[in-house]
Image: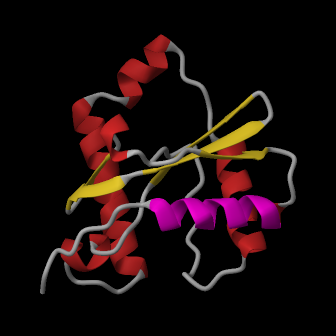
Amino acid sequence: MDPAGKALLLTRDCSDEELGTALLNALAASRMLTLKQAETFFAVAELQERYKAWVAGLMQHYKLKTKKALFTGMDNCHVTEREGVVSISPNAHQRLEGWVRTKSMNLPTLTVAANASAEDIGARLREAFSHCIGRDWGG
């Protein structure tokens, strides 16, 4: 949801190489914020507007009519790259539009070298997605 970042949309059946390339491109477009930039970036009103636009864009792209249709079955992982290591942390789908991760869930953090092949990075991300805890929203 960072306007300076990259929004990369893939199909579920994309290859590990495509998935890894997308992750590497997203990481390359990520940035560190100064304290001043963070105050603006995380200002509630602006954050809510960017989130609404992100959801609307996804719904339009996938031709969905409801948020429930968009978020049901969606997995979420937190990804960081530090000192040449990509760390991927799967999360649990707690609310329709919310994910959580606590130590008591015993979810793994998967790692892969940042200079590994796109295929290996994509395979690791796909494995991390398999550890996400989903929730059935009914209907």
Query: Could you tell me residue 103's position as x and y percent?
Result: 36, 36
Q: For this rendering, which residue is in front, 7 or 17?
A: 17
Q: Quadrant of residue 134?
A: bottom left
Please report the residue visible at 65 percent of the width from the left and 51 percent of the height from the top.
26
Q: Looking at the image, is 70 positioned above or below residue 43?
A: below
Q: Looking at the image, is 81 positioned above or below residue 9?
A: above
Please report the residue visible at 71 percent of the width from the left and 64 percent of the height from the top.
122
Q: Quadrant of residue 68?
A: bottom left
Q: Decide whether the magenta segment is chiefly helix, strand or loop.
A: helix
User: Residue 122 colored magenta?
Assistant: yes
User: Residue 5 colored magenta?
Assistant: no
As drawn, the residue found furthest toward the top would be 35
Task: Give the left or right position of residue 66, taking residue 35 as reference.
Answer: left
- Quadrant occupied by the C terminus: bottom left
Task: Count all numbered tags in the image, as a single digit.
Answer: 0
Please say whether residue 22 is visible from this viewpoint. Answer: no
Task: Give the left or right position of residue 121, taking residue 51 as reference.
Answer: right
Please report the residue visible at 43 percent of the width from the left and 22 percent of the height from the top.
38
Please say whether residue 13 is visible from this viewpoint. Answer: yes
Give the magenta part as a residue range: 119-131
Q: For this rendering, which residue is in front, 69 or 6?
A: 69
As drawn, the residue found furthest toward the left would be 139
Query: Could you tell me residue 14's position as x and y percent?
Result: 66, 81
Query: Could you tell me residue 27's position as x and y percent?
Result: 67, 45
Please report the residue visible at 40 percent of the width from the left and 83 percent of the height from the top.
62
